[in-house]
Amino acid sequence: MTGYSADEKLRFEQLTKLRRQWLKDQELSPREPTVAPKTPGPYNASVFAVTRILIPAWIVHYYVKYHVSKMPYGIVALKPRLFPGDTILETGEVVPDLPEADSHGHH
């Protein structure tokens, strides 16, 4: 008796089928290879946050604050000057005179 027995032939066919399936599985699909997104390190994350989030937000804030908003509800450009003897409008207080330094003056 030469040749393989029925069990050996079946086993050989099964191994051949498995090898062919393995080779077929090794072929790449059009979506492969997929590269997992790399998480940025602390330096790269902070550079991204500053350049892509903070600076543009600051530019928008600056533009809105100084160029778009209406003045009465936006920024007070200059407070009125108060001199000794003037009355403060909100409280009604009188600004006291400056103290006189008789003997300890520089000039």
Image: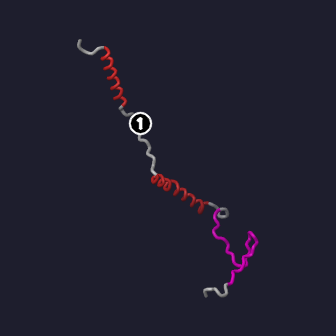
Colour pattern of the rendering: secondary structure
Q: Quadrant of the N terminus?
A: top left
Left or right relative to 26: residue 63: right
In the rendered view, tell whether residue 58 sits above or below residue 40. Answer: below
| Residue 96 or residue 34, whichever sits in front | 96
Which stretch did the figure color magenta?
74-100
Residue 3 image offset from top left, x and y in percent: 25, 15
CA neighbours of label 1 inside 10 A, class few (<14), some (14 to 19), many (20+): few
Q: Position of residue 44 (x, y in %)?
A: 45, 52
Please tell me whether mark 1 sits on a helix, a strand or a loop. loop
Q: Main secondary structure of the magenta part?
A: loop
Nearer the observer, 88 or 43: 43
In the figure, 14 relative to 29: above or below? Answer: above
At horizontal 45% and vertical 50% (from top left) the residue drawn is 41
Give the residue number, with chain letter if any, for mark 1: 31
Foreground residue among 74 and 87: 87
Residue type of the residue flagged with mark 1: Arg
**Nearest to the observer: residue 44 or residue 33:** 44
**Residue positioned most to the top:** 1
Residue 2 drawn at (x, y percent):
23, 13
